[in-house]
Amino acid sequence: MFDTVIRGGKTVTPSGVDSFDVAVAGERIAAVTAPGAIPDSSARRIVNAAGKIVIPGGVDPHVHCAWHMPLPDGSAMVSAPPEVVSRAALWGGTTTLIDFAARNEPLPLKDIVAKRDLDWAGKCYCDYAYHLMLLGEIPPSVFDELPAMIDAGYPTVKIFTTNITPSRSGRMVHFGDLWELFKTLSRAGGLGVIHAEDNDIVMHMYGKLIREGRVSFHNLAEVHNALSEDLSFRRVLRLAEAEATPLYMMHVSAATGVQAIREARAKGQPIYGETLHQYLLYTQDDYKRPNGQMYHTYPSLKSQQDQDALWAGTLDGAINCVATDEVCCNLNIKTIGERIDDTTGGNSGVEPRLGVMYDEMVTQRGYSLTQFVDQTSANAARIMGLYPRKGAIAAGADADICILDPSARGTVKAANLHEADYSPWEGHAITAWPCLTMLRGKVMVADGEFLGDLADGQYLKRTVPQSIRTGPAL
């Protein structure tokens, strides 16, 4: 007896797209069959998905919940917690989030993870994981700790090559430490997760624009510029090449970054690129719109040429994932900074990601459903060591399922969302929207009702596959 059978939908599976029935038993997908192969009497519940699209739950590999947010007056606040963000994610068809456990105090890495668990365990509706994050000077003892952490299921490590703003000293990892990190990751089976900008160029441009009195946030693209991305990407990629280290380049924003990844992959390096839906939908010209800060994250928005290159990268393998860089707060906080050196990064974007990207990819640009699923779910699961448990509609996978309704037409409205009082995608066309989200066999959202419980979310320990670590597998 199956718990649920989803019937009649156009289903996106690893082997292709067709009309399939999906049978769920317990927390797993038990079978994917031809329509009608399973009689109604064999299921406790039948979900009619006729005319709809059945896809694996979204995987967002880049979110920041309960995250420290510096404010212009020197104070700070904390972004929305997992409870808020995970609830919005499920409303939007995303079932897995990957956040960060940052070493911002001199504690062993296992204690850093334990502290982060206090923010997440029992406080998240969907499944989740962490990237370890190393900041500033890295003591030799941390490199000694890393192999055991990787073996324990924490295989991805984030670093910054810039402090981002003049007030955020202590973020940047120097290249000597980065070299040692890459050696450790290669030996232990880890994956580097990189925020790459050239700190000298970025800080030079802050100083230059401040001296010239051009401090408005409208000038952010001059500070976090394409040359900075080019220099830093190429330096990081060369260091990775020397140590055969696999890398995931976060929030690629410029054509120069796309090209650097493309060239590294052509040489056989295991390099993967992530962009954000901000960069795919907005450019630096959008800073001029009312409340233009709402479109910003770090690095900055860039030109139309850069955006075009990002779209090209989604087709040729240089860009593998569309993430959010989620930092959820209300509009008054998002727009409180007005200068190049105090504008808030991140966005409230996890809920509309699947719907907005469906319209942009499938409806507007003619991407296949498989390409859409790869960019919003499957590739992140593959790279981050979650596939095929996550990111696949296949027998044995977790029953994380989103049903999209292509008859749901209209526009994105913040009033209809569940994470903040604004949306950068306000007014964006909707040509399909999630109507049912299932997490490990449990229906979490259906018929406009949220059915989740904070006990539902589970931490996901991971191992990055050798195929991902040894060559550009995607």
Image (cartoon, helix red, strand yellow):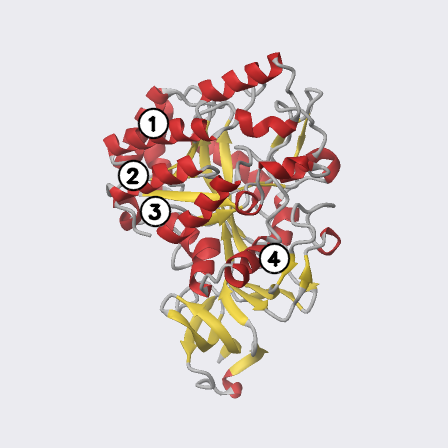
How crowded pointer 2 is (Cα within 10 Å; few <14, some 14-19, many 20+) is rated as many
Which mark, residue 285? none
Q: Are marks 3 and 4 in contact (CB under 8 Å)?
A: no
Identify residue type, mark 4: Gly
Looking at the picture, which amino acid does disc 3 mark? Val
* Dot 2: element: helix
Q: Which mark is residue 235?
A: 1
Residues at discs 2 and 4 in contact (Cβ within 8 Å): no
Between marks 3 and 2 in the image, the one whose residue lies nearer the viewer: 2
Q: Nearer the viewer, residue 308 or 57?
A: 308
Question: Between disc 3 and disc 2, whose residue precedes?
Answer: 2
- Give the residue number, with chain letter if any, for mark 3: 464
Please give the residue where the numbered disc 4 appears in the rendered image. Answer: 92
Between discs 2 and 1, the one toward the N terminus: 1
Front position in the image: 417 or 208: 208
In space, the residues marked 1 and 3 are separated at their CA atoms by: 24 Å
Q: What residue appears at the point 57 percent right and 59 percent down from the top-left corner?
A: 359
Q: Secondary structure at mark 4?
A: loop
Q: Amino acid at mark 1?
A: Arg
Which of discs 1 and 3 lies nearer the camera? The answer is 1
N-term-proximal mark, 2 vs 4: 4
Regarding residue 451, the answer to whether it shows in the image is: yes
Relative horizontal placement of residue 393, taking residue 240 as reference (left or right): right
Where does label 2 land, which residue?
264
Mark 4 crowdedness (10 Å alpha carbons): few <14, some 14-19, many ≥20: many
